[in-house]
Image (cartoon, rainbow, N blue to C red):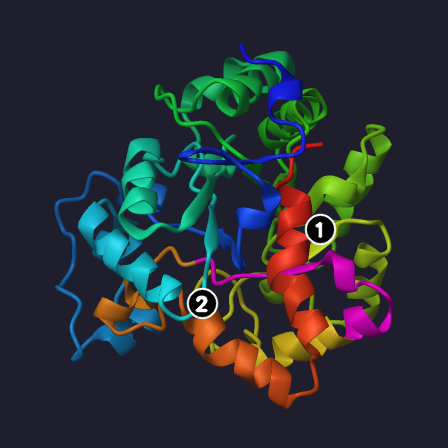
Amino acid sequence: MPGRDAIRGRIMTVRGPIEPAKLGATLMHEHVLWDITRPKMRGSNDQGPEISLDNVWQYNYGEISHPRNYHLEDVAVAIDEVARMRDVGGGAIVELTCGGLRPDPLGLMAVSEGTGVNIVMGCGHYVEPYQDPRNHDRSVDDFASEMIGQVMTGAWGTPVRAGMIGEIGCSAPWTALERRVMQGALIAQAETGAAINVHPGRDPDQPQEVADFIRGQGRDLDRVVISHIDRTIFDTDRLLKLADTGVTIEFDLFGQENSFYALSDIDMPNDAHRLRHIRSLIDHGHLDRVVISHDICYLTRLTRFGGHGYGHIFRNVVPMMRRRGFTDDEVDAILVRNPRRLLTFV
């Protein structure tokens, strides 16, 4: 296994290590090739109707729920969608399709080669319902060894190496299996110098629970990103308390503008509300603790199926940020400097 010194100070992409200055403007949480089909739907022969202009709204609003919308294995489609992001200013994607979501490292390499976009791959395991049942019998050290190998030698039976640990799945309430995976991830982080991305459960106090747990394990929160804050925390007090721990706050549902959210009874914020929360964080000294993305994992969020695509932040959100008083330095921090810091191995 290569030594940690060989990757210290560099960023690991699916095509190999790069110097941090070459990363570019980065989306910190996306899925490019994925299968997030709900466990109860897997194996169904009923894929649902083809996605069209006649029904894309129904898919997005949850009136139609079928496996067809939840997976993408077509590398050619992925290349086209990622190239559209590149053409409006995007330079890199952190792709967090991990255990339970059927990752495709070689496919990601093909997408990166076909577009020139840097892709940083995640590793580890998603929430318990998606995990292999055999994981229940595995130890913390076994999970840690697996993730260390995914970073240092190659992931999912390929030589393609992960550049980040995560998204590590947590539910609310947090399960014993998910805690063991998290403990393994923290060991792997310490051994490799990679950062961790956390998928928190859908409870406003669960991100803080995870942060407190990590701190209680004696681990540094400086290299922990907590995802999906925009569907989890809605009040400024909780948000600032979490940011004060030192974790990075990720708003990663940009482009989801309708209030409907199928997975929980919440009022989903729009992009303007997301920017207000980010402004609150900046005003309280947390500019260096904010990253953004779209978390695309449904076909209907891709451009060819009627969605906004990976380019939405660069086409629409960055101009909105500037209209609302965000400085060039703030935009650069959120899209370039903060991702570069987190993805550089220490």
Query: Residue 308 location, x and y as percent?
Result: 36, 73
Q: Quick check: marks 1 and 2 in contact, CB under 8 Å?
A: no
Give left or right: position of 133 versus 305: right
Q: CA distance from mark 1 to mark 2?
A: 31 Å
Q: Is residue 204 magenta?
A: no
The image quarter containing residue 345 is top right
Please give the count of numbered marks on the rendered protein.
2
Kind of element beneath mark 1: helix
> Residue 269, can we see it?
yes
- The residue singled out by tag 2 in the image is 89
Query: Residue 151 location, x and y as percent?
Result: 53, 25
The residue drawn where x is 68% and y is 28% is: 193
Give left or right: position of 287 versus 46: right
Amino acid under label 2? Gly
Give left or right: position of 37 versus 17: left
- The residue singled out by tag 1 in the image is 207
Q: Nearer the viewer, residue 193 or 196?
A: 193
How crowded is the residue under tag 1: few (<14 C-alpha within 10 Å), some, or many (20+)? Answer: many
Kind of element beneath mark 2: loop
Closer to us: mark 1 or mark 2?
2
How crowded is the residue under tag 2: few (<14 C-alpha within 10 Å), some, or many (20+)? Answer: some
The residue drawn where x is 44% and y is 30% is: 131
The residue drawn where x is 84% and y is 36% is: 215
* 35 to 204, vertically: above or below: above
Query: Residue 112 location, x and y as percent?
Result: 34, 45
> Which residues make up the magenta segment?
280-295
> Residue 74, can we see it?
no
Query: Residue 7 location, x and y as percent?
Result: 60, 26
Amino acid under label 1? Pro
- On-image quarter of the C terminus: top right
